Image (cartoon, rainbow, N blue to C red):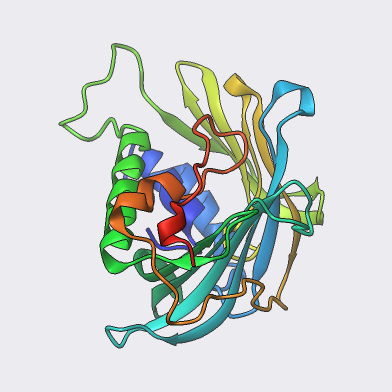
């Protein structure tokens, strides 16, 4: 999936018709065409997640583009850092990731990660071996397929009688966020008259172009807290000679965001740098 249009891609996959034939998709694309730009080095955005439970499961997630170089296949690529923590400024982050991701033109390709570093609150960052990285990417790809909203136009998809995902939008408007007031297009994904997800798409927000998102059924929400264009690298990388994460450890130490059920287990001491 192409990164800076990630939210748009998700919506188009959920749409019951091709983009050019769907009024909801046209509204969003028209909004984005009025000034949205692709990701650049320095772009960053921080989101506030509320996992329900009366505000007891609130955490923050930050994404930033912090550098660029050629990857091992000679493709143009950028370094993307991600952090998760309990404070918007990522004091004592619970997770850090840094990945080298290929790009086509101005679009970042998250299906083309060639290097990956992962660090935890008590673990020094480690680079994944190629074997472990391939395993992680395969797992992520399968999870994305499993979580994809069924497309009723797909003859292979059998939906229950009367169930048809519907994507609908409102007109372009202004909405208040934790990061200030931005121009958005509101989008709703509806199934059997029930709103499954609400999103507010904004061309003003870098990287994800997402201002807000709500999942009413489980009381989860996501809202932009801060963003800017001055990101610098924050992860301290291990020396080239440091041991890499091997395949047998990939599942165990690949980080889960706060609020996930599966706990993170520490890496084996034999594999620690």
Residue 101: x, y in percent?
42, 72
At 32% from the left and 56% from the top, the residue drawn is: 137
Residue at 55%, 31% in the rendered image: 197
Residue at the spot 79% in from the left edge and 50% down from the top edge: 87
Judged from this view, the residue extending furthest toward the front is 270
**Which one is in front, 8 or 117?**
117
Give left or right: position of 200 versus 137: right
Q: Residue furthest left?
A: 156
The answer to whether residue 148 is above or below residue 98 is above
Q: How far across and down, in percent of the image, does residue 136 sit?
A: 34, 53
Can residue 172 be seen in the rendering of this structure?
A: no
Q: Nearer the viewer, residue 53 or 161?
A: 53
39 relative to 2, above or below: below
Q: Position of residue 162 (x, y in %)?
A: 34, 13
User: In what quadrant of the picture does the N terminus appear?
Assistant: bottom left
In front: 150, or 172? 150
Placement of 115 over or under 5, stated as above or below:
below
User: Which residue is at 52% across, 35% downward?
Assistant: 263
Q: Is residue 267 visible?
A: yes
Residue 76: image quadrant is: bottom left
């Amino acid at each position: 999936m192409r990164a800076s249009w990630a939210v748009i891609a998700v919506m188009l996959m959920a749409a019951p018709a091709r983009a050019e034939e769907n009024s909801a998709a046209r509204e969003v694309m028209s909004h984005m065409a009025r000034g949205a730009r692709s990701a650049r080095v320095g772009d960053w955005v921080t989101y506030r997640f509320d996992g329900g439970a009366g505000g007891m499961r609130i955490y923050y997630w930050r994404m930033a583009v912090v550098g660029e170089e050629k990857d091992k296949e000679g493709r143009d690529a950028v370094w993307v850092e991600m952090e998760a923590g309990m404070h918007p400024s990522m004091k004592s982050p619970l997770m850090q990731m840094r990945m080298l991701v290929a790009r086509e033109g101005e679009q970042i390709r998250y299906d083309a990660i060639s290097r990956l570093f992962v660090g935890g609150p008590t673990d020094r960052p480690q680079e994944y071996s190629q074997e472990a990285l391939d395993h992680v990417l395969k797992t992520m790809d399968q999870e994305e397929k499993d979580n994809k909203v069924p497309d009723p136009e797909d003859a292979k998809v059998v939906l229950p009688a009367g169930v048809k995902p519907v994507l609908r939008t409102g007109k372009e408007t202004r909405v208040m966020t934790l990061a200030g007031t931005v121009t958005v297009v509101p989008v709703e994904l509806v199934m059997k008259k029930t709103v499954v997800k609400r999103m507010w798409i904004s061309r003003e927000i870098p990287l994800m172009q997402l201002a807000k998102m709500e999942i009413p059924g489980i009381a989860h929400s996501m809202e932009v807290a801060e963003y800017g264009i001055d990101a610098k690298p924050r992860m301290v990388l291990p020396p080239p000679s440091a041991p890499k994460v091997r395949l047998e450890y990939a599942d165990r130490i690949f980080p889960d965001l706060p609020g996930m059920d599966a706990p993170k287990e520490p890496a084996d001491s034999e594999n620690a740098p």
